[in-house]
Image (cartoon, rainbow, N blue to C red):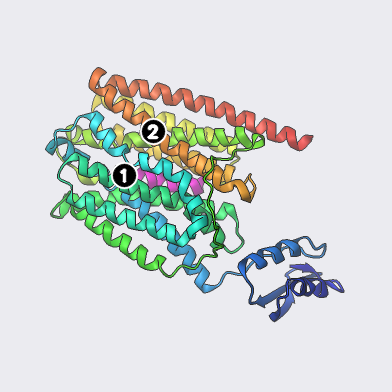
Amino acid sequence: MVYNRPGVLACVSQLFTLFETNIDKITIGHGGSPGISRIQIEVSIEDDKLEMVISQMAKLSDVLQVGMAKTGAQTRSFWIVAYSLFITIFGINVASPLYSIYRTEWQLTSGMITLLFAAYVFSVIPGLFIFLQLAERFGKRKILIFGLMAALSGAVCSTLANDMPILIMARILQGLAVGTFICVSSSTLNELERNRNWQTSSLVTAFAVTAGSSLGPFMAGILAQFAPMPTKLPYIVYGGLVILGMIGMSTVKVSYRKAHRVRFHGLNIPKTIRLHAYTAAATSFIAWGVVSLFLSVIPSYLNEWAGKFNFILSGGMIASIFALSTFSQFLFKRLSVMKMMAVGILLLSLGLMGVAATLQHMSIVLLITSAICVGLGHGPLYAGSLVSISTEVADDIRGDIISFFYLFSYTGIAFPVILLGYSAEQIGIETSVFLFALFIEAGALLSLLLWHKTKTEKDGGRMR
């Protein structure tokens, strides 16, 4: 999009001459406003040169906007990567409705259940450090295919599991897949997005994560309730979906410049955005910490409260949390960050109060109500924090920032609920949940104060 002035076309075409690139086709039309024209240029050019041309073109005084048109192959690749991320996350919570079976058949304690649930996090966390850097050496597509292979291996181990150690191994393999996808897929989606808009790709990433987390346990609950082999068939179906992703991923084309040497490094968090990064990460820690309660401890006790195994109720409750989280991401996206965080924390607090009341009265209605509140609160806290931090940083450090964000998120998934599970064996589930709620509420209040401080510093910087 350019101002319709003499010489603008010559300036634009001259850039391609400087990069020794021939223009194959050029089309000029009205830009929708008086004095504005739309120029469409078709060229055959290497990706690295194209990025430099676009960067230089954007600096021309008569250029209003410049972007890369999305081809059909690029669009397909974008959605194949999004599907692969979705299906990888889909598998993580397939086991959640089945914990009541494992608890009964394998005589598992609440601590063992939480360890079984959180085992995948122990391979996710190191994956956040290494896989994005390995992608620089071997290419993003190869790393994503490796992630799908790990997910398929996890599905096979889950299907064959007849005791806790084998299922823990399956969870670790699934964590390896998630660690691969969380960071590498985010940068890949942004590269395949038409305008390389991090807000769009971050929203698609958040949607894929929450939708996958929702539909996995829902599918498992339905199959466990009505189909044979309740601890095997859900994983078989999941494995088939992963194979579809592997077939699609083999057709994905992503630009790749091979790095001859990879030097692993720590996460680079500049001082100028450190407060913002810690605040966003801590908020996600809290949001996922509460959700993990519904993914591990509560499903394992649900058969006692309901009086029988009810896999649809268990899977449906987990699915509703993530479905409402997905819905609330769109519902509250127009709010300012501060309002989004305040609404999310309020809803999360109401959900925790509902869990405490459920333990007192053994009421399924109270439990479902608390799940609704947690789901609605999780969306703005998780997605709002992710979009807020990913759109505020430069491209060269964005991968490190997102890795840092998910490092905190997955720590929140694992460690608070593991402590809850083992403390329940010593002091009882009711007291443990009460202490868990106090910890989360204190963290939520602190994060809200930090968001206010972040906003104050940002506004102060603009004034200066």
Q: CA distance from mark 1 to mark 2?
A: 22 Å
- For residue 424, what is the image quadrant? top left
Mark 1 or 2, which is nearer the eye?
1
Q: Earlier in the sequence, mark 1 or mark 2?
A: 1
- For residue 289, what is the image quadrant? top left
Label 2 element class? helix
Q: Nearer the viewer, residue 265 or 53?
A: 265
Query: Could one spot residue 31 in this view of the protein?
Result: yes
Sort mark 2 into few (<14), some (14-19) or many (20+) by Cα contacts within 10 Å.
many
Residue 117 tag number: none
Q: Nearer the viewer, residue 155 or 390?
A: 155
391 vs 445, left or right, is: right
Region rendered in magenta: 315-332
Q: Nearer the viewer, residue 94 or 14?
A: 14
Which quadrant of the figure contains the C terminus? top right
Residue 290 tag number: 2
Residue 127 screen position, x and y as percent: 42, 45
Residue 407 vs 140, above or below: the answer is above
- As shown in the figure, which amino acid type bears the numbered disc 1? Ile
Residue 163 screen position, x and y as percent: 16, 41
Q: Is residue 328 magenta?
A: yes
Residue 106 screen position, x and y as percent: 14, 37
